Amino acid sequence: MTRKPYSWILLMVVLTLVLAGAATAAAQTGGVKVVTGPTPVINGDASKPEDITLMNDRLAVTFSVKTASPWGVARGGIVDGCPIVNGKPTLDRITLVDFLPNAWSNWPTTYQKVTVVKDTPEEGVIQTVRDWEKVELVTTFSLKKGEDVIAMVTTMTNKGDQPYPDTISGYVLWTNGGYLFSTPGLAEKKGSAEGALADWAVAYDQDWTVGLHGPYMTEYAYFARDLNTKWTVKPGESRTFEGWVQIGPNGDVSSALALEMKRKKMTGGAVSGQVAAVGGGKVESPMVVAEKNGKTYTWCLAPGGAYKLSLPAGKYTIYAIGKGFAPSAKAEVEIKDGAAVEKSFKDLAAPGKVTFKVKEEGSNQPIDARIVVEEGYAPVVSFLGKKTFFTDLEKIGGTTVEIAPGKYVFKVQSGENFIAKAQKVEAVVKSNEAATVQAALATEVNLKEKGWYTADLHHHSNLLDGATPPEYVVRSELAGRLDFLFISDHDTAQNHGELAKLAGLRKMPFIHGIEVSPSYAHFNIYPTQLGQNMSLDVGASTVRQLFDESRKLGAKVIAVNHGFNAYGYYYSLDSDNVPGGFQPDYDLVEINSAVPVKEQDKAVKKAYELWNQGYRYYLTAGTDTHDVWADQSGKIRVIAHLDGGPTVDGLITALRTGHTYVSYGPLIFPEVMFGEELRLEKGKSIDLKFGFQSVNGLKSVALVKGGQAVDTKTEFGADNKKANLTFTVAVDGDAWYSLAVEDANGNKAFTNPIWVKAVTYTKTAK
């Protein structure tokens, strides 16, 4: 690693301080200011002298001119952003706001030019010009004095002689942590925008909002973080897209609706009133929610217990909520043009406290657990109360939470589907009272006694698009009863040190990795040097350069992540879209539970194809969890046989030699270890013996040869939770055999192959 001269470091420190002072002055004057240099946004990513910040007294955003954009996206978009509070920039809330020409596959791009078009106290304008294949993209970002919104206009022109069919274009919004209020009326992860009640989505937390408006939207992805339209870009054709990014200083999303009403000149009125607890007490963080057509439409704050909510003309259902409080009764209101409606809510019930205690049945030892509200109240505004809880890191098996009063059914999970069934527990929480909820889960198998250990080998924390602080990464992975702690944030090792300390508290082996994320492919590399980032520009590097740098960082494993989505290695190779072309120096093929099943099936088939060619790229698995409150760590996992106990070196060796399998639940115990090669006399036969176990019961076990199931068992006797099976196979040539197992709940497992080398003895020539 080359050390920077002290003079250079001093220069950068001075430059940063000067720019921060200029930014603060600009924010306090109220006018628009364009500042060149490292971002004044606290904890922002833009660090180069050429980067550009656009700001006024309400917001600040920074454009990546020389700083690399995340996920290999071309430079020129917004990579930092925050509200201005008391005249000063606050914490960075934006990972990326930008226009993407074709979803997340925006390679190749050869140039990016970012210029200041206008710099006056009344308005600042930044223009980004770049290419995607033969298409030119010109985007202007405009901020006016006193406004909380940046207007974005992108013109996309096909300068080539070939059309681009089914191109998915639009603006995207990805934030640092927080929560997401998807476009009202849309509930799925992606799909058609038909049925949407608005054309915006808002990321938020208690002290900020970032909204994205896209009136061109005909479809969406990632719960409306991406607002898109699908079209064919004909030769010579141009199309202009218009959008807005809006930044606010609190969790009030009604500002997005207010901007939409202004943009569309929608008529309407307002409803206002008071919010109070039963008996007139104060409500913590009071808010009022409006529903339209039975779906959450917007919400506003009620500071000091008073609220006013502007709505388009129409009929709504409204109610009040607060932190930990049970919601008020719902009320029907009709908003007419220019009319004012009064409606107060004074019936919110104060929270109660619940202490959870989870133990192992039989031993009565406390165990780590994830606790989910299966039935009962969960607020639509996520920072007012969660639906998922975890037992404490140091106080194993227990946690105390404040929760709204009411009837609940809690689902308690600890190694669910693998070693124990979840348990449902009913409870009644009363206002201002404490309750205890206890659960005892039966551990049905001890994998460690059999030499098997588990890991979720694709997991994120709270960096870039992640939403999970390091402590909760550990708590969640422990609740999955995983034996290794694993992390692989996008292009950064920032949280390695903190996670290492937390792993030490529980004496958990820690595998620290990075998800290398150019736009054409993602790879998990591990173990890397603790806290060490890549020194090259990931987005501008070839796959060969990335692999070489990964090995320099100490990575003994390179895994192809979600290989068949739009930014998967195999997908991009099949599309001739990998800079430098195919490079074989990787190790594992990932089964990723976050992608559609059809893409998981493609990954399994790709592994079969590689094995048929004699290439020993083995399977790995991970959940790709970003938010542990929404996704379950260890839902899919690698199960590895380690003779010497759970060590990082031991797991790496098992992964590279195929002494592993991947599973959503079913457990497999082979007599001949996966990844081993048997040399057998051709013309003979051999018995392959396996043990199986499933807490949910077994449904089917298929023996796979050359990619095809050659023998399937579906009868397992009265006790279908355990089975010992023998498959007799003829040694008729070189081959490999693996297993595909399914339990009664549809959870599957796939093994790495057992290699068979057929040997024929030829008498020695005389």
Image (cartoon, rainbow, N blue to C red):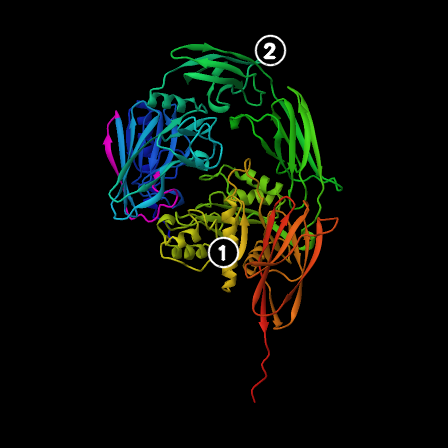
Mark identifier at residue 279:
2
The C terminus lies in quadrant: bottom right
Left or right of 103? Residue 747 is: right
Q: Amino acid at mark 2?
A: Gly
Residue 112 in sight: no
The image position of residue 286, as x and y in percent, is 51, 19
The image position of residue 98, as x and y in percent, is 35, 37
Viewer-proximal residue among 383 and 616: 616
Picture layout, residue 137 above or below residue 724: above
Residue 582 on the magenta span: no
Residue range in magenta is 99-122
Q: Identify the image quadrant of residue 119.
A: top left
Outermost bottom residue? 766
The image position of residue 750, as x and y in percent, is 58, 53
Task: Calculate the distance from the C-alpha at mark 2 to the C-alpha at mark 1.
Answer: 64 Å
Task: Tell me how many marks there are.
Answer: 2
The image position of residue 150, as x and y in percent, is 33, 29
Mark identifier at residue 606:
1
Q: Identify the image quadrant of residue 94.
A: top left
Viewer-proximal residue among 734 and 512: 734
Residue 107 on the magenta span: yes
Q: Amino acid at mark 1?
A: Lys
Residue at coordinates 52% horizontally, 49% vertically from top-left? 600
